[in-house]
Amino acid sequence: MPAIDEVTLHSLEGIVGVGRVLTDADSLQLYGRDWTRVHTPNPAAIILPDSIEQVQEIVRLAAVAGLAIVPSGGRSGLSAGAVACNGELVLALDRLNTIEDFNPIDRTVRCGAGVVTEQLQNYATEQGLFYPVDFASSGSSQIGGNISTNAGGIKVIRHGMTRDWVAGLKLVTGSGELLDLNRGLVKNNTGYDLRQLVIGAEGTLGVVVEATMRLARPPGELAVLVLGAPDMAAIMNVLRAYQDAIELSAFEFFSELALQKVIAHQGLQRPFDTPAEFYALLEFEQRDEATMERAMNLFEHCVEQGWVLDGVVSQSIAQAESLWRLREDISETISRWTPYKNDISTVTSRVPAFLQEVEAVVNKSYPEFEIVWFGHIGDGNVHLNILKPEDLPMAEFQQRCGEVSKWVFDIVQRYGGSISAEHGVGLLKKPYLHYSRSELEVSIMRQIKKAFDPAGIMNPGKIFD
Ligand SMILES: Cc1cc2nc3c(=O)[nH]c(=O)nc-3n(C[C@H](O)[C@H](O)[C@H](O)COP(=O)(O)OP(=O)(O)OC[C@H]3O[C@@H](n4cnc5c(N)ncnc54)[C@H](O)[C@@H]3O)c2cc1C
């Protein structure tokens, strides 16, 4: 265990209370990591404050003592942003988990940073409203973590990213000061929008302690279509046909291999017998009968054009949910192969060529690697997953994947894409940031960090050094 002196531990206990500073081996392991399994957790202690004032006091103490802080949410992150492997203090927001001040006119609600995403979704439903940011880890991720990663998910094509739902937020800076940013306003053109800088900053500018989140009108009954396509170009044609005629709330895709793995391990049924190279999952609101008729006509058109080989449309909420599981259960299913995961994007229209190039470059050197593709294709975001062959030692797999990353990011750069579409940079993507951001941009980011965090204690070493 890394050393933290008794006096500091005692002072921290004085702030949060006995039993709220954890140093036992299990807690250090649990809170020192996120969903990635690349780095060995090694935090000095875990602190569990239950008020904004306590967070301020902890940060002030850390700034004076020169101790680094890693803010920690639901630890479902996929870029090692919440990993503490250098004797840092992990500041876990779990206890700031209240939802208050619902305002039906503004359609906003005030959330502690530790509110779990699903808790907010359920709260919105109870008010007859809707919180649309959603993804497979909503049951564990927290609003503070969602804001700090600008989480996207399965409804971005219709509802945007977390950024679009933050009406205001409170941030404890690296000096322990409290910033109250935007205060729930819709219109506020008074200089730089610091709220937006904090969103996606991965805890490097301070600790998000509270947020005013917007809620939306709930959607009507949702229909889900799963369509099998012969190739990626056909998927693009399907996207174009449907998005021109119907307002889609999701347009996801997955490969045949992804489907096979999910079916084998989750006890689900194939959506239909005809095998296809790729599958598109579309969701839309069934506003009236005409919408469904349009969807069915489009289906026939896509079949006639050869873009769709087969398909199924949900007939009930239960069937819609089980069709969604074909896509949503992929991450968890393939985690048993400790996959190399990459979350990359380009403009949507260039995805087919982009995907082909990536696949060719991996196949050329490592034809034995199984590639599982899935993702949010409607917004140009694909998840590349390479499964570790059983007989290949982990260290060697990681070394080969390191090579793969460079090849893939060269392609991303040529396509003007992003090396991290929605999972952030953290420790995992830090060495590759230059593929997406210029030297000047990174230097400006460093200066911004200095303004928020002069002592450099907020999640140091994440995004950039
Ligand atoms: C199965 C699965 C599916 C997923 N699907 C998606 C998806 O579709 N779209 C998507 O965008 N992501 C997805 N993710 C990734 C992840 O769930 C999101 O990045 C999520 O927003 C992380 O939230 P968290 O609370 O778990 O944050 P953590 O992992 O705890 O932290 C993430 C980062 O935010 C910082 N942080 C956390 N809380 C705070 C705070 N209060 N103040 C300041 N900084 C803070 C951490 O230091 C870290 O840098 C998925 C993950 C899994 C495991």
Image (spheres, grey):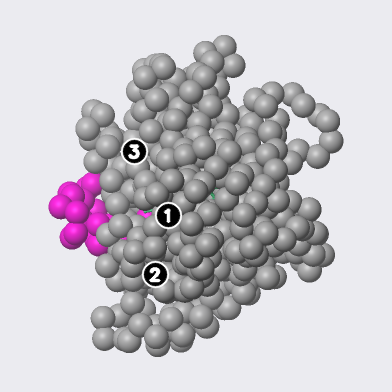
- CA separation in Å, label 1 and label 2: 24 Å
Dividing the picture into quadrants, the one containing residue 392 is: bottom left
Relative image position of residue 227 (x, y in whole percent): 34, 46
Q: Which residue is mark 3?
A: 225
Counting other residues with Cα less than 10 Å from the Cα at mark 3, is it few (<14), some (14-19), or many (20 or more)? many
Counting other residues with Cα less than 10 Å from the Cα at mark 2, is it few (<14), some (14-19), or many (20 or more)? few
Question: With respect to residue 400, does 38 lie above or below?
Answer: above
Which residue is rendered at x = 56% and y = 38% of the image? 52
Q: Can residue 73 be seen here?
A: no
Element under disc 3: strand
The residue nearer to you, when weighing 7 against 453, is: 7
- Magenta stretch holds residue 310: no
Which labelled disc corresponds to residue 21? 1
Task: State the extent of the magenta-drawn residues as a range.
Answer: 253-275
Q: Amino acid at mark 3?
A: Leu
Which residue is rendered at x = 33% and y = 67% of the image? 25
Q: Nearer the viewer, mark 1 or mark 3?
A: 1
Query: Split into 4 quadrants, where in the image is the C terminus?
Result: bottom right
Q: Amino acid at mark 1?
A: Val
Relative image position of residue 120 (x, y in whole percent): 43, 31
The outermost residue toward the right is 191
Which labelled disc corresponds to residue 37? 2
Element under disc 1: strand
Question: With respect to residue 334, does 288 lie above or below?
Answer: above
Element under disc 2: loop
- CA separation in Å, label 2 and label 3: 35 Å
The residue nearer to you, when weighing 231 against 306, is: 231
